[in-house]
């Protein structure tokens, strides 16, 4: 990941997004996602809510651009074989304004001392549409955990 961690609050904080390319966008198929807290635990036990929700456009969000890295890095370390044309946006310091809560594909709570992992069953992956400059965001919020949360997605393009 690149950029600065953003502390959680009682409103959703976008940790990472996969954004469809401006030219020839592709559908993105999520096969695995995880979230976990990485700061010192709160003194009282608390929950964190995580979701994957569709964001209809770039909106007013501000974050750090990130290049998705393939799991097959080729025959030489740090040599990409199949680079995604979708881009990434990580650690938003200003939230995108175009999330569509009705299009929430995944929502799960977890404890600050644990994490959450979602793996699809074959044929039941989450597939986002190919819409220019749009794409789902992996977000989190908590009413009393104000530390940092990281997220990771394994996806491919169709």
Image (spheres, rainbow, N blue to C red):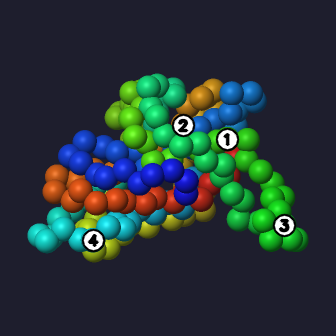
Which x, y percent locates residue 102? 35, 33
Marks 3 and 4 close (CB-CB < 8 Å)? no
Looking at the rendered structure, the secondary structure element under dot 3 is: loop
Calculate the distance from the C-alpha at mark 3 to the C-alpha at mark 1: 19 Å
| Residue 106 shows in the view | no
Q: Is label 4 or label 1 in front?
A: 4
Quarter that holds the N terminus: bottom right
Calculate the distance from the C-alpha at mark 2 to the C-alpha at mark 4: 31 Å
Calculate the distance from the C-alpha at mark 2 to the C-alpha at mark 3: 27 Å
Identify the residue position indicated by label 2 in the image. 135
Calculate the distance from the C-alpha at mark 4 to the C-alpha at mark 1: 33 Å
Q: Residue at 68% of width from left, 27% of height from top?
A: 22
Q: Residues within 10 Å of mark 3 (few under 14, many from 20)?
A: few
Q: Determine which of the numbered discs, if any, sits on residue 74 in the image.
A: 3
Closer to the chain start, of discs 2 and 4, is: 4
Closer to the chain start, of discs 2 and 1, is: 1
Q: Determine which of the numbered discs, if any, sits on residue 2 in the image.
A: none
Q: Residue at 60% of width from left, 29% of height from top?
A: 133
Marks 3 and 1 close (CB-CB < 8 Å)? no
Name the image quarter holding residue 31: bottom right
Identify the residue position indicated by label 4 in the image. 40
Q: Determine which of the numbered discs, if any, sits on residue 86 in the image.
A: 1
Looking at the rendered structure, the secondary structure element under dot 2 is: loop
Q: Residues within 10 Å of mark 4 (few under 14, many from 20)?
A: few
Looking at the rendered structure, the secondary structure element under dot 1 is: loop
Depth order, front residue of 42/17: 42
Which x, y percent locates residue 63? 49, 40
Calculate the distance from the C-alpha at mark 3 to the C-alpha at mark 4: 37 Å
């Amino acid at each position: 990941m690149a950029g600065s961690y953003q502390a959680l609050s009682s409103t959703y904080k976008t940790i990472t997004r996969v954004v469809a390319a401006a030219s020839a966008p592709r559908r993105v198929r999520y096969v695995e996602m995880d979230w976990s807290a990485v700061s010192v635990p709160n003194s009282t036990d608390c929950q964190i809510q995580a979701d994957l929700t569709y964001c209809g456009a770039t909106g007013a969000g501000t974050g750090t651009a990130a290049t998705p890295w393939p799991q097959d890095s080729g025959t030489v370390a740090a040599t990409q074989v199949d680079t995604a044309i979708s881009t990434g946006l990580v650690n938003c310091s200003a939230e995108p304004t175009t999330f569509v809560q009705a299009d929430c594909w995944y929502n799960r709570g977890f404890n600050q001392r644990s994490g959450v992992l979602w793996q699809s069953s074959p044929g039941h992956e989450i597939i986002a549409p190919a819409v220019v400059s749009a794409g789902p965001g992996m977000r989190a919020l908590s009413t009393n955990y104000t530390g940092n949360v990281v997220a990771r997605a394994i996806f491919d393009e169709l």
